[in-house]
Image (cartoon, rainbow, N blue to C red):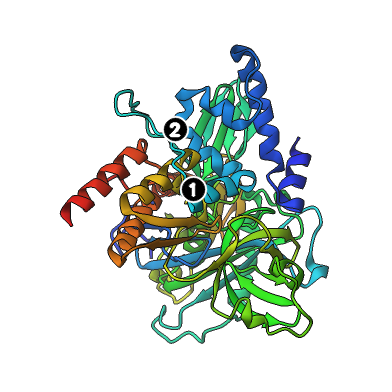
């Protein structure tokens, strides 16, 4: 299993191992639920007790579900079924912050998930992050670190150069990538065409990671919601906080959008584009996003952010 | 001359005041600050990323590349910036000290870069640097089986001390003979394993094992500080 894990995370850099974990987990969950859960979403909605964990789930399956979060965000549909209603609100215990080497579970009844490993009778954490229990599965969700591009991630990148074969795009991390002519537009790009007609240096693009190579990344602009961003505000956050900013099924980002009256696109690399009808609403959205980033480990964050936004709105 | 009272009035098994912080460098993937009194180190971690040139790559294991340097103003006589004989050695031993803690087999063909800068030096810079780097590696979200805690021990005028300062390192007998032994040690505290052991001076094997026990005890205290630093890196809601 460890061998597979390594292959999954290092070679392809895809969400392979996480998938496997979910399957494992679903298997023993399904025993109690009469075999529901064709997809992760239906699974989640059947287990309200994990409601607050779901935002964090997206950390591990960010690679697969990234577009769902951002896409929903971009189109502004109000799919907020995830947030608990005011009547049945649950107080969640704050999840423990664990450090590498800490014993997080004892005994063979538990299974080591992502961010943990078995050592004799104990399961120890190998990462600095939040401890999470899913039935018998124990895992640690990292809360800090660098963005590693994964295939099919929706990211926001800046055009830093134009070459004869395409546009060089920077994600704000060390690795930069290329948006080739073939993937650059849905239109046919003529030979010797003026590439600045499409995207110029300094333009910000909502783009998709098409392929991850050892030295660079390839991007694509073919897909729904992928476009050049014209005006607005860019907020940069730690990429590990992105799932929290999106929230369960987009609950957090939809809340911010509704209250601050802004259009928001969240890139998996931690770049967030905010466009409101005036600068005040953009700044409010920015403050809320920064708040989510700083307090992503706090339980019941959606409610707290809702209060924060309501207060800020009231003051204006 | 017997060494009965330490220059700064500490107990013989007491470290200087420890200060630690994580997330001090915004652009780094992980960063930390660690200070033993006047010895202040700052560490930044970048990566993992693919290692180039390609012939250095190892297809089964990643690599840690460490870069230790002292700021030119960190010592009273200006230190010429850049790598030197001493800096290269310390970079190398720091790499070796950190390697067993990080699960490098998760990152084939990759390199994790660790930059350690000494802001102010009063002996024990490599140990402060290792402590800072270990925190920075954890802060960078890298998989680790343990943190690394490090401290120096020594024999000054026949007396074993923990966390030496510069005056103690340069301690001289009445006849002008240098009689200080300096032993930087790094532990994986949970596993109780030694990952760095250097020795400068003379010491009997019996005293060495005593000194190592003292070092382990201090490292356990440092480990607690490191754990607390990481756990308290996140603020309460306000």
Q: Residues within 10 Å of mark 1 (few under 14, many from 20)?
A: many
Q: Residues within 10 Å of mark 2 (few under 14, many from 20)?
A: few
User: Pointer 2: what residue?
Assistant: A81
Q: Viewer-proximal residue, A24 or B212?
A: A24
Label 1: state its secondary structure. loop
Q: Can residue B231 be seen by looking at this rendering?
A: no
Identify which residue is drawn at 73% across, 66% down. A183
Q: Which mark is residue A143?
A: 1
> Where residue A94 sits in the image (x, y, percent)?
38, 34
Check the picture and name the quadrant holding the N terminus of chain B: bottom left
Vertical position of residue A294 compared to residue A107: above or below: below
Identify which residue is drawn at 40% across, 42% down. A297
Label 2: state its secondary structure. loop
Vertical position of residue A173 compared to residue A252: above or below: below
Q: Viewer-proximal residue, B226 or A261?
A: A261
Q: What is the distance, in whole Å, between disc 1 and disc 2 at their CAs?
A: 25 Å
Vertical position of residue A273 compared to residue A91: above or below: below
């Amino acid at each position: 299993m460890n061998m597979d894990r390594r292959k999954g995370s290092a070679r392809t850099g895809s969400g392979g191992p996480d998938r496997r974990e979910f399957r494992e987990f679903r298997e023993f969950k399904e025993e109690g639920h009469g075999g529901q859960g064709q997809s992760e979403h239906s699974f989640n909605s059947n287990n309200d007790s994990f409601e607050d964990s779901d935002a964090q789930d997206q950390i591990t399956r960010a690679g697969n579900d990234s577009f769902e979060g951002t896409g929903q965000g971009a189109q502004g549909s109000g799919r907020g079924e995830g947030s608990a209603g005011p009547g049945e609100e649950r107080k969640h215990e704050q999840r423990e912050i664990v450090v590498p080497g800490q014993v997080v579970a004892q005994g063979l009844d538990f299974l080591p998930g992502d961010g943990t490993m078995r050592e004799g009778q104990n399961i120890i954490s190998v990462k600095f992050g939040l401890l999470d229990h899913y039935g018998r599965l124990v895992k640690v969700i990292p809360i800090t670190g660098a963005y590693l591009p994964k295939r099919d991630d929706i990211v926001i990148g800046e055009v830093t150069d134009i070459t004869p074969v395409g546009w060089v795009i920077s994600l704000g991390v060390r690795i930069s990538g290329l948006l080739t002519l073939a993937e650059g537009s849905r239109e046919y790009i003529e030979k010797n065409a003026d590439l600045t007609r499409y995207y110029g240096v300094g333009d910000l693009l909502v783009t998709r990671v098409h392929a991850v190579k050892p030295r660079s990344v390839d991007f694509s602009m073919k897909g729904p919601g992928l476009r050049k961003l014209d005006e607005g505000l860019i907020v940069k956050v730690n990429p590990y906080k992105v799932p929290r900013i999106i929230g369960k099924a987009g609950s957090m980002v939809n809340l911010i959008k509704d209250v601050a009256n802004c259009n928001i696109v969240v890139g998996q690399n931690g770049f967030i584009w905010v466009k409101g009808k005036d600068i005040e609403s953009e700044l409010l959205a920015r403050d809320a996003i920064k708040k989510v980033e700083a307090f992503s480990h706090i339980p019941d964050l959606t409610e707290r952010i809702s209060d924060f936004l309501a207060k800020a709105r009231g003051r204006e | 001359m017997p060494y009965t009272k330490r220059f700064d009035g500490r107990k013989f098994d007491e470290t200087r005041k420890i200060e630690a912080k994580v997330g001090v460098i915004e652009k780094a993937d992980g960063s930390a600050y660690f200070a033993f009194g006047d010895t202040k180190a700052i560490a930044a971690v970048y990566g993992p990323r693919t290692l180039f040139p390609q012939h250095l790559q190892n297809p089964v294991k990643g690599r840690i590349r460490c870069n230790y340097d002292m700021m030119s103003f960190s010592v009273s006589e200006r230190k010429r910036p850049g790598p030197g004989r001493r800096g290269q050695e310390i970079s190398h031993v720091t790499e070796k000290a950190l390697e067993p803690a990080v699960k490098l087999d998760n990152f084939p063909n990759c390199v994790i870069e660790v930059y350690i800068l000494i802001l102010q030096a009063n002996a024990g810079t490599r140990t402060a640097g290792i402590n800072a780097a270990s925190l920075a590696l954890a802060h960078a979200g890298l998989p680790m089986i343990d943190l690394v805690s490090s401290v120096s021990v020594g024999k000054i005028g026949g007396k074993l001390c923990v966390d030496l300062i510069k005056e103690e390192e340069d301690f001289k007998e009445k006849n002008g003979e240098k009689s200080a032994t300096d032993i930087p040690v790094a532990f994986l505290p949970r596993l109780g394993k030694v990952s760095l052991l250097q020795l400068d001076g003379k010491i009997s094997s019996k005293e060495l094992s005593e000194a190592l026990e003292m070092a382990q005890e201090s490292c356990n205290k440092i480990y607690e500080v490191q754990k607390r630093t990481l756990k308290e890196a996140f603020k309460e809601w306000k």
